[in-house]
Image (cartoon, rainbow, N blue to C red):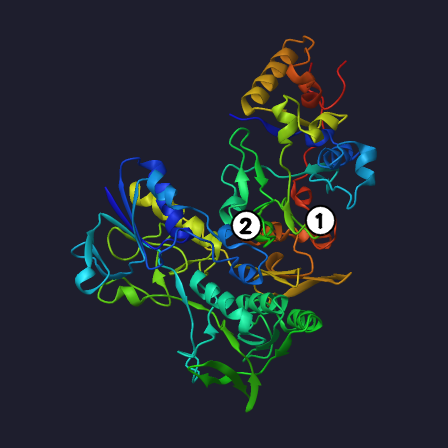
Amino acid sequence: MDKAIFTFIDRCVACKGCEIACAVEHSRAKSLFGALAESPHPRPRVRVENAGVHSYPARCMHCEDAACIAACPMGAMTRNAATNAVYVDESKCIGCWMCVMVCPFGSVSADPVAKKAFKCDRCPDRTARGEDPACVAACPTRAMIYATPEELAAHRRQATAMNAAGKPVARVAGNVDLWRSLKGGTQK
Amino acid sequence: MKIVIIGNGPAAVAAAEAARELDGHCGITMISKEAVPFYSPCPLAEYVEASVPRDHLFLRDEKFYRDQDITTFFGHPATAIGTTARRVTVGSGSDAAELPYERLLIASGARAIMPPIPGLAGTPGVFALKTLADADGIVARLPAARRAVVIGSGFIGLEAAQALVRRGLAVTVVEALSQVLPQMLDAEMAALVETRLRDHGVDVRVNSPAEAVLGGQAGVSAVRVGGQEIPCDLVVCAVGVRPDLSLLAGSGISTATGILVNEFMETNQPDVYAAGDIVEGFDRQGQRRVLPIWPNAVNGGRIAGGNMVAARTRSFRGLDGINVVRIFDLPVASFGSSAGERSLRYAGNGILKKLSLSSGRVVGAQFFGDVNATGLYHELMNKGVDVGSFESELLSPGFGYGCLIPRPPLPTRLAA
């Protein structure tokens, strides 16, 4: 399967680094200082939300059977054939907000200035270069990882097995320390 | 397998694509009274407004039908359905053709309601805004038009009014009921919409049923309302749409307001399916409804298309009743009922949001000025989520999906 962004909710510390990285990635300048000078300011497509005792970096789930694609009367909501990510073709979007009405996660918003639907595009430029999406790369606690479901499952199995054997766990591909996530704390 | 589809709108095309994806070899024939390829009727007001070019309306081109190996009868209306002989008649008289089917989908949509107002039918310069031909007609008349009357203040009527204002016309909207958007909003919300329309130069008249359309063969000259004549050169009649059942006479297909379908999009006749604006199906709460909106058409079409190839493999979770309209760029949305046991309210910065709750569940919403996360509230209603534990956060600006995540247990160390 294709890669997706997975969240380890207990690791998010609400630093909002993902929000800044997302806004910068979607700026024209693609740098923080350049982005600050742009008008209107580029806005993040990920939002850290309160989730009880935790926080949660909410963004588009790129649903397999995406309600927003079915609902778009302009054919503007599109799936990227290479990455399977769902994105807005701004040349077609007329800002009717039907996608906003049907997204069960509240992850498509109405951009009042551009009058275009606004959502996570999972950073096609970055992933084409083999990099993680900006939010994932920016997260200092690795609360998000970009991996296939199979990779995620394999890594977690490995971490559990290593744990049962009392052996230290190597950092897995992408430098993701799933061990810490499973343990929920630092390893002794 | 021979599949015949009557219609060429979102439900028809979604069904054809779903059937073709499952079966590369089945015969698919599409019949449409309109001669053009699949286009979206949703941005017709924007096309009139000239903010969306005509070619952007078309979502498929002729090549699509060839590539998908679909036989087309476009510009030739289906005129009769024989459910016993399993045939559809296309055209009439000497041009008539009989098409046999093994599976039939009726997705021929709705038609604009033209109320029996004297002079409305047949007077040049009077249009609905339902089809591309209607929109082309309005666009062609614009150079000679200075004043317009829009009959009806549903979302099509208001979109038309806005488009005509932006094309430089003086526009009057006449509404028979006591408020605008009567199907969509309560009186308080509607008053905000009326104010915004007036601020942008629209003459809004509620409690004002149109009594007569005046004019002759030269064209419309006025609309009479409450005994008073409102001069105009253009009339848009937008009092709603209704499933077009004219084709079904003698077919034995059961109907009420629309064609009655079950969750598989089956009609009462064997191997005859229906989808799109013509159906009367069940909403998520199990009520029979006619809900002619784009997402219902696409989703219903996909279900019907799949089931025509492999019976009862797909079922519909229910029609959605959601509304969204922009009033001079300000979004306004609603779903469900405004008559809950209690109402939550948020007001500020020109925004008004109301949520209706009953038994701790969301039963409806109305939003003016900000529609973000409407889909999330709609999902809370559809799933019947008990919102009691986070009710105070529901309309706060920080509310989002994260608030719904069940609190996970605090991390515990695994035994070494």
Label 1 sits on a secondary structure element that is loop
Whether residue B287 sits left or right of residue B309 in the image: it is: right
Label 2 sits on a secondary structure element that is helix
- Name the image quarter holding residue A55: top right
Q: Identify which residue is drawn at 33% across, 60% down.
A: B33
Which label belongs to residue B314?
A: none
Whether pointer 2 and pointer 1 mark residues with C-beta atoms closer than 8 Å, the reply is no
Note whether A66 is above or below B240 in the view shown: above
Q: Mark 2 points at which residue?
A: B383
Q: Quadrant of the C terminus of chain B?
A: top right
Q: Mark 1 points at which residue?
A: B399
Q: Residue B243: x and y, percent?
A: 38, 65
- What amino acid is labelled 2 in the image? Lys
Q: Residue B331: x and y, percent?
A: 65, 59
Badge 2: chain ID: B
- What amino acid is labelled 1 in the image? Phe
Whether residue B215 sits left or right of residue B263 in the image: it is: right
Compare residues A28 and B315 and report the one nearer the observer. A28
